[in-house]
Image (cartoon, rainbow, N blue to C red):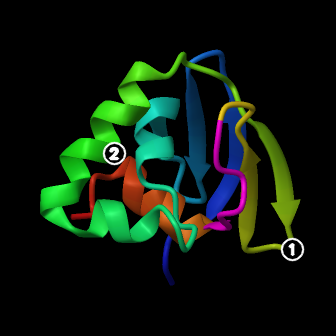
Amino acid sequence: MSTKLRQIERRDESLLLTLSDGEILEVPYHVLRSRCPCANCKPKWENSQRRLGIEEEVKRLRVEMPKAEPVGRYAVRFVWTSGCSSGLWSFEHLIAIAKGNLD
């Protein structure tokens, strides 16, 4: 059985993910934002040459706690006041970001 996401907690500058096995992962919002899965952003971070550009762009923005909207039992949508809000963040995608498994 694979590890499932049990809880999401929004903090001032990061997201805490509690997994079904008890592991707790923390992801800063600027890291989340630089790995947005929407159709506009995803090609930027999937391309290693363009990834640095999007990471620098996100670092220049102020840190903000996005609004979080649940999407069924598999994803969440983050609403950023200063940018993209169209991506659906599957729980698997969030866990992969937190564990550094997106390259």
Q: Which residue is drawn at 42% across and 33% down?
A: 58
Regarding residue 24, the answer to whether it shows in the image is no
12, above or below 85, in the image: above
- State the image quarter where residue 19 is shown: bottom right
Name the residue type under label 2: Ile
Residue at the disc numbered 1: 72
Front residue of this view, candidates 47 and 25: 47
Q: Which residue lies furthest to the bottom in this view?
A: 1
* 88 or 44: nearer the viewer: 44
Residue at 57% in and 68% down: 38
Q: In this view, does 31 lie above or below 103?
A: above
Check the picture and name the quadrant holding the C terminus. bottom left
User: Residue 50, position in %: x, y?
Assistant: 22, 57
Say what secondary structure mark 2 lies in. Answer: helix
Left or right of 37 in this view: 70: right
Span colored in magenta: 83-89
In the image, residue 84 sits, relative to residue 80, either above or below, namely below
Q: Tell me where residue 9 appears, x and y as whole percent.
A: 71, 34
Extreme left residue here? 49
* 1 or 57, nearer to the observer: 57
Is 48 placed left or right of 87 in the picture? left
Residue under label 2, please give it. 54
Which residue is at 62% across, 60% downward? 5
Is disc 1 placed on a helix, strand or loop? loop
In this rendering, position of residue 59 left or right of residue 70: left
Whether the magenta-drawn stretch holds residue 95 is answered as no
Among numbered discs 2 and 1, the one appearing first in the sequence: 2
Q: Position of residue 86 (x, y in %)?
A: 71, 62
Q: Can residue 1 be seen in this view?
A: yes
Depth check, mark 2 against mark 1: the one in front is: 2
Residue type at the position of mark 1? Gly
Indicate the quadrant where residue 87 lies.
bottom right
